[in-house]
Amino acid sequence: MDEFEKELKTDFLTEALSLLDDSEQAFLALEGDKHNVDLMNQIFRLAHNLKGTSRAVGFSDVAEFTHEMENLILKVKEGIIPVTDAIVSLLLECNDHITVMIRMLNMDMDAKFDSAEIIVKIHK
């Protein structure tokens, strides 16, 4: 990996932690305001940005998992899945999972992740 690629990845990892903090706060706010359309739009944008940027810098495990989370958020946003405490808990669990991935990538940019168990929960 050349210096430019390493810098892009490092910048992404720093930004991702900030996005994940914002997401966590949005999920917690959603718990108390389950019908807030603006909040759902914000949550979707955060997930979408995280997915696209992680893919762009080559963190495919993060991108693939975030894609699954984004699909869940889209179903909630479109009213296909109602906002319940269980859904908010699952979204927070997804956020925690991505946070762990980002922290591990900070230590080893070649780290790989198995998200199969939580993806099963998303698809239920």
Image: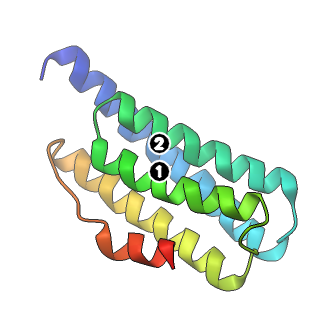
Residue 110 at x, y percent in the picture: 14, 43
Q: Residues within 10 Å of mark 1 (few under 14, many from 20)?
A: some
- Extreme-bottom residue of the structure: 86
Give the residue drawn at x 87%, y 61%. Answer: 36
Give the residue drawn at x 73%, y 81%. Answer: 84
Residue 87 at x, y percent in the picture: 63, 77
Q: Nearer the viewer, residue 53 or 68?
A: 68
Taking the image as shown, residue 110 lies to the left or right of residue 94, namely left
| The label number, if any, that marks residue 67 in the structure image | 1
Residue 40 at x, y percent in the picture: 76, 56
Q: Quadrant of the N terminus?
A: top left
Taking the image as shown, residue 84 lies to the left or right of residue 47, namely right
Disc 1 to disc 2, C-alpha distance: 6 Å
Nearer the viewer's eye, disc 1 or disc 2?
A: 1
Taking the image as shown, residue 73 lies to the left or right of residue 118, namely right
- Provide the residue designation for mark 2: 51
Q: How many marks?
A: 2
Q: Are marks 1 and 2 in contact (CB under 8 Å)?
A: yes
User: For the residue labelled by badge 2, is the local secondary structure a helix, a strand or a loop?
Assistant: helix
Please tell me in which quadrant of the rendered image residue 9 appears. top left
Give the residue drawn at x 40%, y 76%. Answer: 120
Amino acid type of the residue tagged 2 in the rendering: Lys
Residue 124 position (above or below residue 23): below
Residue 61 position (above or below residue 52): below
